């Protein structure tokens, strides 16, 4: 018996059937779906990272004492960075195991997946989605500490020279500030550096660097808008 | 009823696949068409005794996955891929049972070879045979690309499709394999 006939006989005897086409189609669709989903979720994670970076004052680092540096580092969106890495791995894995995935080197796969997530994430951030997503996360996930919460923590250390809150009243060389815990402060700002974007008006939210000079008294050396580095108007605290 | 050689000859690879899915007997044409070159490939990868069995098992896998065949690939590349996987799995099995025959390389025969200035047909034949034995000494990772490139005469794209690695990696691996082969051949009194 020819080997080819032996093969056909084995197939017939063992009733071996080809795996149906839909199984392969389903597998490939799932891989593609997983890739797209991972890229999309990676994009969302990246947009929140952008938002967190935007909210972080890196210039503060040099002023911070070692013990406070930890708090500052806590502002960095590690949760979202880890999420981004996980989604990138899922995206790379799913495309690598797709029918044509082997054509790409790992470096190319990482590059393309990251580029897609970065592009979509940036668009989402520009559209304001990152802030909303972060807020929704903070509201619905009890363990999650939002960027804003961490930021308030960092800027609520008057004894270390950091204060923030909403302007209640504006006087000559002083302002009355209500911090985010509701405590009232008299802030002296005659010699404070203030970028043009800061408006000392009732209702404005600001952050200050300076020195606590007494109970409820603070001498400001620098005033910044709450929502940014000082280059633009703050969006205000939610 | 198995199709005759003439009928098989008239049908293209694609037609044979289509016909096989309707009538399994046509699958024998595909086996007959590629049997010789695939058997040779299996043997070149170092599986001699079980070559027939490996090919049979590979063709059963080919049959099971017939609907997965990507029409943008050359059928031969796809067949080589499945056969290759079967060979690798066979080699692994042999290794795990301690039956690896890689050490059958005849070093004495190399030592007894005449200097290359005495080259004649016999020596050339011997050289060809020893090339295969030297290939046997290479790790599978290098041996497979050397066999595909220089013995099976495959393009980088085909090798990429068979081994499921990027073409750039194929090129790098071939370079490294050539270096390893050269280094190995330097130990013996014959020029490659």
Image: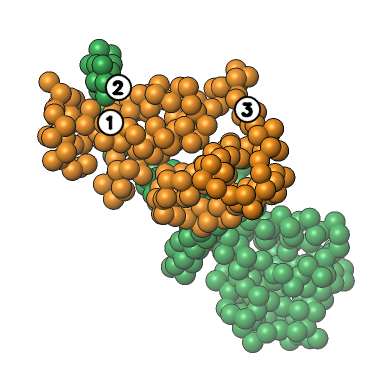
Count neighbours of disc 1 (C-alpha within 10 A) and say few if under 14, some if 14 to 19, many if 20 or more: some
Camera-side mark, 3 or 1 = 3
**Few, some or many C-alpha atoms within 10 Å of disc 2 (few <14, some 14-19, many ≥20)?**
some
Identity of the residue drawn at 71% across and 84% down: A194
User: Is A160 in front, or is A53?
Assistant: A53
Give the residue number, with chain letter if any, for mark 2. A3
Query: Label for residue B104?
Result: 3
The dot on residue A226 is: none
For the point 55% across and 48% down, the residue is: B120
Question: Colour in which chain B is shown?
Answer: orange
User: Label 3's element?
Assistant: helix
Q: Would residue B10 be found to the left or right of residue B63 on screen?
A: left
Q: CA distance from mark 3 to mark 1?
A: 31 Å
Q: Alpha-carbon distance for marks 2 and 1? A: 8 Å
Is mark 3 in CB contact (under 8 Å) with mark 1? no
- A89 or B172: nearer the eye? B172
Residues at circles 2 and 1 in contact by the CB criterion of under 8 Å: yes
> Which quadrant of the figure has residue B24?
top left
Residue B31's disc number: 1
């Amino acid at each position: 018996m020819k080997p080819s006939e032996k093969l056909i006989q084995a197939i017939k005897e063992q009733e071996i059937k080809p795996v149906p086409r839909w199984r392969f189609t389903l597998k490939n669709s799932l891989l593609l779906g997983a890739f797209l989903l991972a890229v999309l979720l990676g994009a969302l994670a990246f947009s929140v990272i952008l938002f967190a970076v935007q909210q972080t004052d890196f210039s503060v680092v040099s002023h911070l004492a070692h013990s406070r540096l930890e708090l500052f580092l806590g502002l960095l969106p590690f949760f979202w960075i880890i999420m981004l890495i996980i989604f990138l791995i899922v995206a790379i894995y799913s495309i690598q195991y797709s029918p044509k995935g082997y054509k790409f080197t790992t470096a190319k796969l990482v590059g393309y997946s990251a580029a897609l997530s970065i592009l979509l994430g940036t668009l989402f951030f520009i559209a304001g989605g990152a802030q909303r997503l972060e807020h929704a996360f903070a509201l619905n996930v009890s363990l999650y500490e939002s960027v804003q919460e961490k930021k308030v923590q960092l800027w609520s250390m008057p004894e270390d020279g950091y204060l923030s809150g909403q302007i209640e009243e504006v006087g000559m060389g002083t302002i009355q500030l209500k911090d985010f815990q509701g405590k009232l402060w008299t802030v002296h700002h005659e010699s404070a550096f203030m970028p043009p974007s800061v408006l000392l008006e009732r209702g404005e939210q600001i952050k200050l660097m300076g020195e606590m000079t007494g109970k409820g008294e603070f001498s400001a050396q620098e005033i910044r808008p709450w929502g940014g580095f000082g280059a633009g108007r703050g969006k205000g605290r939610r | 009823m198995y199709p005759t050689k003439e009928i098989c000859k008239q049908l293209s690879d694609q037609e044979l696949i289509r016909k096989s899915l309707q009538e399994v007997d046509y699958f024998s044409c595909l086996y007959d068409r590629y049997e010789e070159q695939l058997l040779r490939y299996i043997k070149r990868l170092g599986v001699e005794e079980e070559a027939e069995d490996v090919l049979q098992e590979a063709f059963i896998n080919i049959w099971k996955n017939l609907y997965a065949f990507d029409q943008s690939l050359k059928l031969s590349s796809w067949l080589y891929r499945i056969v290759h996987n079967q060979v690798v799995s066979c080699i692994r099995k042999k290794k795990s049972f301690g039956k690896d025959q890689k050490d059958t390389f005849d070093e004495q025969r190399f030592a007894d070879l005449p200097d290359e200035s005495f080259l004649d047909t016999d020596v050339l034949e011997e050289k060809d045979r020893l090339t295969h034995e030297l290939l046997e000494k290479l790790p599978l990772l290098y041996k497979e690309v050397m066999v595909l490139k220089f013995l099976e005469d495959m393009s980088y794209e085909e090798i990429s499709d068979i081994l499921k690695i990027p073409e750039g990696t194929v090129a790098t691996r071939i370079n490294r394999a050539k270096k390893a082969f050269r280094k190995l051949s330097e130990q013996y009194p014959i020029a490659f």
